[in-house]
Amino acid sequence: MITTIDPSTIGKPTKTARAARRHVRTLTGYTPETDETGKEKWPRGDEKAWKDGIPHLTSQVPEITKSVVQHVHTSLARQAYNLDNIGAYQAAALSVRDNLLVNWNDTQLHYSRKTPKRAYYLSLEFLMGRTLDNALLNLGLKEKYNEGIDKLGFNLEDLIDQERDAGLGNGGLGRLAACYLDSSASQELPVWGYGLRYKYGIFQQLIAPDGSQLEAPDPWLERDNPWELPRADVTYQIRFYGHAERIEGMKALWQGGQEVLAMAYDTMIPGYDTKNTNNLRLWESKPQRGFDLQSFNAGDYERAVEASNSAEAITSVLYPNDHTTFGKELRLKQQYFWTAASLADIVRRFKQIDRPISEFPEYVAIQLNDTHPTLAIPELMRILVDEEDLPWEKAWDITTNTFFFTNHTVLPEALEKWPVPLMQNLLPRHMQIIFDINLIFLQQVEKKFPGDKDKLARMSLIEEGFPQNIRMANLACIGSRKVNGVAELHSELVRATIMKDFVDFFGVSKFSNVTNGITPRRWLDQCNPGLSNLISDTLKLPKAEFLKDLTKLEGLLKFVDNTAFQKKWAAIKQSNKERLAHYVETTLGLKVNTHAMFDVQIKRLHEYKRQTLNIMGVIHRYLTIKDMTPAERKKVNPKVVFFAGKAAPGYYIAKLTIRLIVNVARIINNDPDTKDLLSLYFLPDYSVSLAEVLIPASDISQHISTAGTEASGTSNMKFCLNGGLLVGTVDGANIEIAEEVGESNVFFFGHLTPAVEELRYQHMYHPVPLEQKCPALARVVNEVAAGRFGDGGVYEPLLNTIRQNDYYLLTEDFDSYIQALKLVDEAYLDRTEWIKKSIRTTAKMGKFSSDRAIQDYAQEYWNIESTKV
């Protein structure tokens, strides 16, 4: 009989959600079969022929040049006659990727044989930075490739500069995830990352003639990405919309709606000084069928590509603007698409080891990096209840022993909430599951705290209102085995504020701390090779020893008073300043005074990070210098201030801050009275690669958030590791840095966390005029309003955040801030003592390695062990 099909169903989703998952898989990662004696059997063909053809590491210069030339000819279809730097970079990258794949394949086969418990790190951002330099460093092949590339007539540093930063993140959240993947591989831990393969990333930041931020697409994939491995054989169907019908008990059948394909792209993550190479798997959205041929033939061209465009939009842009209904829906689509594909992949990989699903938590740990991946909790429940036929109680037990949740904020506005009507429409089955979780959980809360309706309302997953909202932080908390903050103060605040009711219910043991960390490979050796070499030579240690155990930097304390060592230290800082000055001159066409003190603040623009306080301080300094006599100016410490960072496209006040910075720079940099003593630069389009130039050049860095608002920070750690001193509030990881390096080597100012709420209360109900409370700041605000730096009316909304309410306490902290900067000036004039402070700071940064942090997660949370290949 001939099989027939209804033409109207072509391109539409399958009718049932219980059909087998569509998934084709290669044999990669499977273990060999064994005979009756236990000896491994070769799967096919002649074993010797196969093994003779298996590639090996190309670690000698002749092999390297041969590999690069081969890729020029066969991968790029070019020759020496028409090869430019971009082509040479691509060929070199493909050659290095071949080496990574050798180790990657060995690592995956080793994991498959040993079947260790694995951890999976779910993060919506992975701010990886450039890969070529990092890969060569971790492989230990940088010198050999440098020589080989030179033989081919190119310069390795020039090729490294051709690489574009992967557009997979925005700021600290994504950079932390990248550091943790690097450390996991370096610590030989079986950890994979899961994220989204954004086509356009965050955005390219441009500055308009009037100083305002403009956003342009960042097509970082336009020249192809040689580091990724497309996995057309790893695809999953992801459903949206439709309807969910209860079929028996807590089970349901979810069907209809839209189906989108998730396709995997793998990026190898090499460990340092080890063969272990882990994986970052990114998902790209694709249509179930790419083209509606019937609509096209009927002349309806828009409908022909409608489904395709709708599917591909999911992974087009990181953080679509959620000020519109469409943007909100797209963000939620992104989060479910990513978590559903990742869970499907994790479950499949677990099933490869042929263990019952009840043992899932014994082999799998999943870390939720902030609330973005929280939908993984109801998604795993859906898989276990609807597809694996487990009872609800057993499914919930598995789920709550699998997930771990990292909270990154105590700001109420930063805690994710999703409207119930949106969730019901887009993910009807998940809304059912969330309602079920909530009801059962609140019944347990009521038993423990009978009659406490306020507590029930606060702990509910559903926030009442019009419309109702789902509190994702509450869901992440009750659905995870443990919850952690990312600095000691932050974790205390989490327990005392946003999670207090949950601490009362679950007990304090569920809530703990893992202070963030950074990888010393990228943030010392790679970005500051001169300093790394000096440390190695001085301590008589191979780099691998202190780059994998940062506490060994304490050996530098013996050389603090060594004059020759101090001179070498200062020379390296000066060299890094000149490198930054060269960057500014070549990109912006501006000259920088490299003999001045370099003051740097690089963060995403946000009111709580208080770039506004910094720029107000710069204006105050400018006005003060203008008021001086020529004789007084001769005593001024020359200073160059650098800002870099992006404001979210819809964040009006943050964008006004950028505009003010740019326009203040135009005035003071051209003022003959002050330009030799104070200059200001806003460096557009901040990225990891730009940070690698800025951080080693800094004398001081500013981390000046309102006390109690910054969860941790990691840029503070990067600056201090490179010998830059910290100016900051008693907030986040600043506190722990000061404990390690000594408060005499940092410059603290501002009110402490316990005072913040009372001060805000006073602002609201007992306001004091700005001129009375803080005359110095009032003068600055008035100068801006009067048009000294361009049209003052433009900045009124920004200035009013200071005049009225002042939620982030600029008026309270400004005088203290200016005093701290005076102390910095006084300290900097004693160059010898300053260099000693810089050396002590670097020497005491051992605690802030991401290797330490990832071991904390591995031992205290995930219960996984190192597995050396």
Image (cartoon, rainbow, N blue to C red):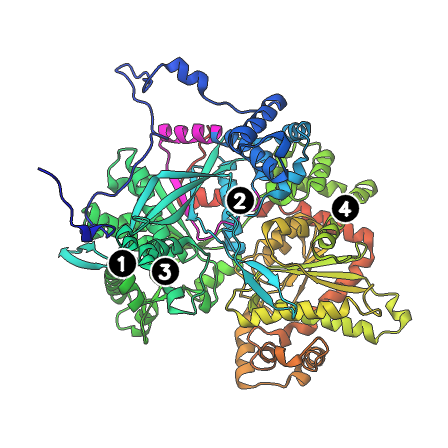
Q: Which residue carries the number 4 mark?
A: 575
Name the image quarter holding residue 138.
top right
- Determine whether, in the image, residue 241 is placed left or right of residue 650: left
Residue 292, image x and y in percent?
Answer: 29, 52
* Mark 4 vs 3, N-terminal side: 3
Q: Which residue carries the number 3 mark?
A: 332
Q: Nearer the viewer, mark 4 or mark 3?
A: 3
Alpha-carbon span between mark 4 and mark 3: 47 Å
Alpha-carbon span between mark 1 and mark 2: 39 Å
**Is residue 481 something that shows in the picture?**
no
For disc 3, the neighbor class at 10 Å (few under 14, some 14 to 19, many from 20) is many
Residue 184 in the image: above or below residue 629: above
650, 104: nearer the viewer: 650
Residue 322 in the image: above or below residue 105: below
Q: Which residue carries the number 1 mark?
A: 430
For disc 2, the neighbor class at 10 Å (few under 14, some 14 to 19, many from 20) is few
Q: Secondary structure at mark 2?
A: loop
- Determine whether, in the image, residue 671 is placed left or right of residue 524: right
Alpha-carbon span between mark 1 and mark 3: 12 Å
- Amino acid of disc 2: Arg
Q: Secondary structure at mark 4?
A: helix
Residue 13, image x and y in percent?
Answer: 23, 52
* Mark 4 vs 2, N-terminal side: 2
For disc 1, the neighbor class at 10 Å (few under 14, some 14 to 19, many from 20) is many
